[in-house]
Image (spheres, helix red, strand yellow):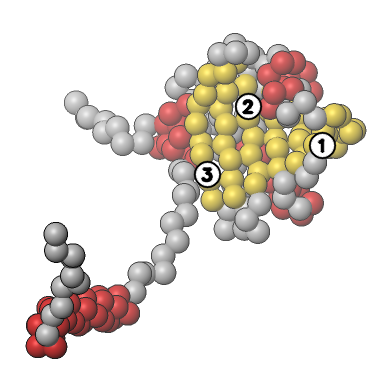
Amino acid sequence: MSEDRPVQITQSQAQRLRTPMMGMIITMAVLVGILALMWFMNPEPDVTYTRDEDVPEAAGWADEVAGYSPIAPDVPAGWTANYARWETRAEHGVEVWEVGYTTDAVNFLGFAQTDNANPAWVNDETEQAQATGTTNVGGLSFETRERGDRHYYVLAAEDNHIDGTTVVISSDAGAEEAQAGLEAIVDSIGREVPDSERNDGVEENDE
């Protein structure tokens, strides 16, 4: 029985084996270099998308189903609306008009408005936050609540002599921004939605 002997190759054979491998490595290096050059010549554009809902337009649609004029405040310049929607809180039997903003300092301030509030809904909107007192804005008395860095302002229906709706405002903004938002919201309570917003996109035909 013969013993297995290691396979031996000549120097020329080894050179022929190395040649294709070196070619592959060089080709890959060239391709990587070309791709890197193309990437540096065409960098990704420095564009940041900011969501900004049209609150008056959304309020115009909500006005058709709400039994009150949905709040569409004139917030300070630089604020953007993250959402503006008509929602049904089935678990509480409450229909709500709600809007949320990102402030100029990139903080949050939002509100929820309804004409059929109940304690369970208010507690849910305020995350079970404890009452801390009251504050007066534009002649309306709000109950203040606080939880962590989030502040809540609750305008009960019986304290709203403008349209009788309940409004819950929440914010993590600083005092100055929060006050500006509160005043803008109060100023727009009961304000009718303009016909141009209510009928936006609907053409009238003259007979």
Give the residue at mark 3.
Answer: 82
Toward the viewer: 116 or 149?
Answer: 149
Instruction: Look at the numbered discs 3 and 2 and tell me whether their residues touch, using CB distance below 8 Å.
Output: no
Q: Name the residue located 46 percent from the left edge and 49 percent from the top edge.
A: 51
Question: Which label's residue is closer to the chain start, 3 or 2?
Answer: 3
Q: Secondary structure at mark 3?
A: strand
Where disc 1 sits, the SS reads strand
Work out which residue is located at the far right of the displayed protein and give it: 133
Task: Give, as a three-letter code, the residue at label 1.
Answer: Glu
Query: In the displayed structure, would residue 182 be above or below residue 3?
Result: above
Q: Is residue 94 left or right of residue 120?
A: left
Question: Residue at 29% of width from left, 32% of height from top?
Answer: 202
Q: What residue is drawn where x is 82% and y is 36%? A: 146
Q: Position of residue 69 (x, y in %)?
A: 56, 27
Question: Where in the figure is residue 191, as x and y percent of width and height?
Answer: 59, 33
- Horizontal and vertical percent position of residue 201: 31, 36
Residue, disc 2: 113
Which residue is nearer to you in this view: 150 or 27? 27
- The answer, for residue 23, to whether it is visible in the render is no
Which one is in front, 8 or 63? Answer: 8
Alpha carbons under labels 3 and 1: distance apart: 23 Å
Q: Is residue 62 above or below residue 100?
A: above
Quadrant containing the C terminus is top left
Q: Position of residue 98 (x, y in %)?
A: 57, 31
- Three-letter code for the amino acid on which mark 2 is drawn: Gln
The three-letter amino acid code for the residue at tag 3 is Asn
**Residue at numbered disc 1:** 146
Q: Quadrant of residue 128?
A: top right
Q: Residue at the spot x=57%, y=58% of the render?
A: 78
Q: In whole angstroms, how far apart are the C-alphas of marks 3 and 2? A: 16 Å
N-terminal-most mark, 1 or 2: 2
